[in-house]
Image: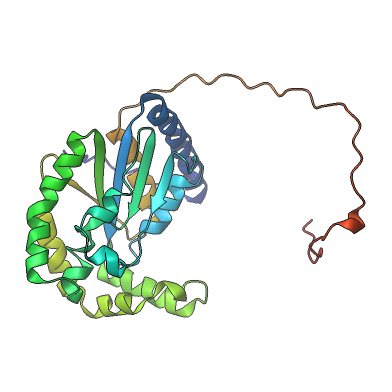
């Protein structure tokens, strides 16, 4: 069901306040996941520069990495290429009391591998046939699966590509595959459409998030994510600090330690 209510317009301070509120709720969700022993998987897919990494960072910024953590797998090794395709992803699935956020996932086969020719037509067809069944299997095992597609316009993607080219802090994000993806914009669009047509199922739907504005994307996605897993606020036990040990202690002289030079002092 689509929510047609008018969005609330926020300024910078409003964004920061709402993000803080949502992050508090994420901590409460985290506590519920541990308490109930839930297993949650969230997939983040989308074009390069769509804002997946930044959104994931806002989710994990205030949470416990032992409970909510990110998985971003690199290229498969020679050994992994001979394995069942889903095998290395299965190894990353959560145990009870964990939420795993996949920054790109098994859907690499339906996107970059398909467009760039990194898999054969037979491997692609097998993936498309098996993927809905694979997802149903892990759901039946007790895993909550949520899939997000971050949608960025070609104009905004181009602007972000240029910003990466111009910034020495972001230039590393532009891999040869990313540059080739820019040249194959339509191919990727068609691959995404085919992926949705064959893997957007009743049990495992795709949720699309407009991501031209990164701050809006983060708020919209996090608020939606919190609605996907019913949780309750748990009462936290009040922590009392124990008294510090009073036995006499004398610190060794500073000259005996290797100190980092104090080159800066912020006032």
Q: Using the image, determine if residue 127 lies above or below residue 161.
A: above
Q: Position of residue 242 (x, y in %)?
A: 73, 22
Left or right of 182? Residue 202 is left
Q: Position of residue 129 (x, y in %)?
A: 7, 55
Q: Residue at x 89, y 44 (%)?
A: 251
Q: How is the image coloured?
A: rainbow
Residue 62 showing in the rendered view: yes
Q: Using the image, determine if residue 224 lies above or below residue 120.
A: above
For the N terminus, give its image quadrant. top left
Left or right of 2? Residue 257 is right
Q: Count the marks: how many?
A: 0
Relative to the observer, which residue lies in front, 162 or 116? 116
Relative to the observer, which residue lies in front, 135 or 54? 135
Q: Residue at x 80, y 27 (%)?
A: 244
Where is residue 267, by image quadrant?
A: bottom right
Residue 10 showing in the rendered view: no
Q: Position of residue 49 (x, y in %)?
A: 35, 66
Q: Residue at x 35, y 33 (%)?
A: 96
Q: Using the image, determine if residue 48 lies above or below residue 213.
A: below
Left or right of 70? Residue 41 is left
Where is residue 230, by image quadrant?
A: top left
Left or right of 59? Residue 250 is right
Relative to the observer, which residue lies in front, 132 or 15? 132
Q: Position of residue 191 (x, y in %)?
A: 14, 66
């Amino acid at each position: 069901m689509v929510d047609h209510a008018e969005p609330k317009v926020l300024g910078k301070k409003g964004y920061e306040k709402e993000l803080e509120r949502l992050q508090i709720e994420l901590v409460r969700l985290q506590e519920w996941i541990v308490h109930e022993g839930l297993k949650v998987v969230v997939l983040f897919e989308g074009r390069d520069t769509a804002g997946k990494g930044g959104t994931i960072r806002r989710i994990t910024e205030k949470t416990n990495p032992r409970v909510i953590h990110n998985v971003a797998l690199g290229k498969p090794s020679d050994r992994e290429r001979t394995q069942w395709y889903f095998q290395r992803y299965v190894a990353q699935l959560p145990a009870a009391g964990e939420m795993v956020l996949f920054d790109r996932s098994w859907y690499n086969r339906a996107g970059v591998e398909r467009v760039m020719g990194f898999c054969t037509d037979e491997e692609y067809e097998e993936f498309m046939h098996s993927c809905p069944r694979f997802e149903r299997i892990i759901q039946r095992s007790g895993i909550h699966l949520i899939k997000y597609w971050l949608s960025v316009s070609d104009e905004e993607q181009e602007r972000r590509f240029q910003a990466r080219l111009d910034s020495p802090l972001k230039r590393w994000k532009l891999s040869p595959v990313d540059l080739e993806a820019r040249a194959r914009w339509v191919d990727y669009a068609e691959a995404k459409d085919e992926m949705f047509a064959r893997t957007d199922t009743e049990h495992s739907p795709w949720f699309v998030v407009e991501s031209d504005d990164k701050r809006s994307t983060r708020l919209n996605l996090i608020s939606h994510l919190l609605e996907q897993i019913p949780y309750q606020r748990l009462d936290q036990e009040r922590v009392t600090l124990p008294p510090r040990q009073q036995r006499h202690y004398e610190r060794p002289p500073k000259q005996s330690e290797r100190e980092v030079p104090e080159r800066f002092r912020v006032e």
